Amino acid sequence: MNYKAGVCNFCGTGCGHLIEIDDGKVCGVFPSQNHPVSRGRLCVRGWHIHELLRSDQRIDSPLIRKNNTLEKADYDEAVDAFLDYVSKNIKNPADEIAVLGSPRSSNEDNYLLMKLARAGIKTGNISLDSESGHRNSLNVLSTGTGMPGMLGSLEDISKTDFILVVGTDITKQNPIIGSEIHLAKERGAKVVTICSRVSQISKLSSTHIQIRPGTKKILIAALAKSLIEGDMQDSEFIEKYSEGFEGFANSLGSLNNAEIVEKTGIEIDVIRDTAKALSAAKSAMVFFASGISGLDQDTISYIYNLFLVAGKIGKEGCGVNPVAGICNLQGGYDMGVCPDLLTGFQPLDDETVLKKFSSAWGVELSKDGGKPVYDLLADKNSSIRALVVVDHDEGIVRYSERIKELDFVLYIGAFENSFTEYADVVLPVSAYIETDGTFTNTERRIQISRKKLDPPEGVLPAWQLYTRIAEKLSLNWEYASPSDIMDEIASLTPSYSGVSYDRFKGINGIQWPCDSEHPEGCARFDIDEAEGGVRFVAVTGDFTVPDVNETYPWLLMTGKSQHFWHQNNLMKRTFIPNREYNATLLLYPEGYVEINSDDAKKLGVRDKWPLKVTSEYGAMNVVANVSDDIQPGTAYVPYFIRDMISEFLLEHHEIIEKGEDAIIPVRIEKV
């Protein structure tokens, strides 16, 4: 038996594991006992990742669509088909071509994809296959502190006195982090959850504040207001390190106690007690989901400002911590896979930055950024004609009709999936254990995954494929290995400047910034090192919330079901998670809507009885899932049925894009 260390490729926690290799095949997976994040544990997804890695549903040959059928080809023929289309049909790539990167690709692969899009294809329309939640978090944290990433460290969870969890059921999205929070509570830390549903983490918490849907921002603002009015803010910290406090404090003046209680459903005494506990704690951390179900930027700004008021930023055991849902979501943004940024959150429109990259790449880059791919697909008037997609989760099917209208779709991926139905050309790449690469987890920990197996015969790693395409575009890329690519990343990216493959020997990752001042990395944001201190982030002061009326008397929330996590194409290739997903489908084959038992009595229905859910924009037929995890007058629907996405939720895409605070007024009727 041969056991090789690696990093789990599912969620953003970045757990360490050992892959068992026997006779050139993946046979099993075991947790790494000395890994600083997972410490000998794996969640149900991680325990079954070997099933994904030994799947026979691999794309093992390039494919070209001929006569409406995908036929096998070689790489040169398939790449030439794409480039030939571009040269003959695309007049303005900056408007007509878009590139959708993958938050599961390695840093090196994402960097080369970004470089290829900008320097070779000549488009700035590049973004990650994720919603806006994580980018919103990075915007806030970068504006406030200059660090576009988690301000704390997962290892600090065991050292903190107070933990606030906003919205996410972290025990399901990132189970290892959830278990660390639960262990902290067992050791004596106070854990407070704010959510409209009773989730697993809320059941394990010290205090659960079950707010009305769509009012997280109001509750967070009310906590900050309570700190200031009760003279519980950390005045010494605010005066010494921050700027903008008065402006933020004044923005809370429009909130009055009666309005807070009416909108949130939470009594003022509960808010005051929570604020008092936050203020009294020596250290405190907050966790909230980012990525596909993340919060909007304004809500994140209030969370950040709340912890700045409490003086719980930049110290051991403290941190404002967005939790990435996908393994290299943080790394994807670090690599500049977004329209307006280059690596390390360096702005594209900064002339010094642009000149640095243009010189290093030997091309004249445009300072004009593009648009996120999902925005282009949602805009029926956009000029997009061709789309390049790397990997994907099934959330993209909500744009299926728009994608069918495109002239050309190029798909790049390792595993067979339904998206190839849309592709004109398919290019296979190796799986992540079949080449070297680094991945950056939710706490900024850069970890290396070494090659453990050879890919299927003839299949290229993505970095080699991108290099081949670049060569055909007359770009002189000379990379002998992913290590060479990381050296180039480090030379252009201040926060990665001290990173090299040699640095990963004998360690479990490096948390950026890793530079001359932090040669061993940086566990957390350090307030004493912040040049010019930190600043409060501007907020809107808008506390309007969705409301019901006689026609639509319920507030419908949307989110993930327990096992069909993130519309995840990879989950279906792991036996136990897929079995549980199928079990859910057996119980609720057309989906379900979760309603309170009191509402079920009023409607005259029981569990699994058919219901019709109607909004201003559409309707869907589902069955009832009677539960007291939600309040009367509210409802919850998981988006794990494909038709529900395309037929009902698609009509509400502008609402759904708000993430966890996506609330739809609906009418629910017994069928």
Image: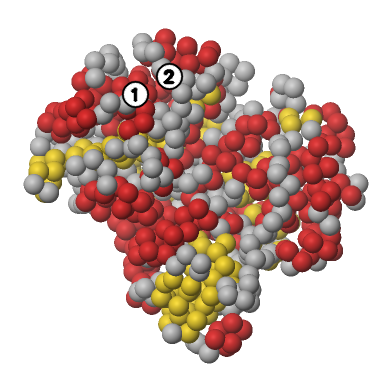
- Name the residue located 57 percent from the left edge and 26 percent from the top edge: 513
Q: Residues within 10 Å of mark 1 (few under 14, many from 20)?
A: some
Location of residue 332 (image quadrant): top left
Amino acid at circle 2: Ser
* Residue 33's disc number: none
In the rendered view, tell whether residue 441 sits above or below residue 666: above
Q: Please tell me whether mark 2 sits on a helix, a strand or a loop.
A: loop
Question: In the image, 475: left or right of 534?
Answer: left
Real-space CA distance between mark 2 and mark 1, rounded to the nearest whole angstrom:
8 Å
**Quarter in which the C terminus is drawn:** bottom left
Q: Please tell me whether mark 1 sits on a helix, a strand or a loop.
A: loop
Residue receiving disc 2: 366
17 or 411, which lies in front? 411
Question: In the image, 456: left or right of 644?
Answer: left
The percent coordinates of residue 319 (x first, y second) are 68, 41
The percent coordinates of residue 59 (x first, y second) are 19, 45
Amino acid at circle 1: Lys
Residue receiving disc 1: 122
Q: Residues within 10 Å of mark 2 (few under 14, many from 20)?
A: some
Earlier-in-chain disc, 2 versus 1: 1
In the rendered view, tell whether residue 95 sits above or below residue 411: above
In the rendered view, tell whether residue 166 sits above or below residue 579: above
The percent coordinates of residue 464 (x first, y second) are 25, 27
Question: In the image, 517: left or right of 128?
Answer: right
**Pointers 2 and 1 in contact (C-beta within 8 Å):** yes
Location of residue 414 (image quadrant): top left
- Name the residue located 44 percent from the left edge and 71 percent from the top edge: 619
Of all residues, the one furthest to the front in this rendering is 381
Q: How many marks?
A: 2
The percent coordinates of residue 294 (x first, y second) are 55, 50
**Quarter in which the N terminus is drawn:** top left
- Name the residue located 59 percent from the left edge and 48 percent from the top edge: 296
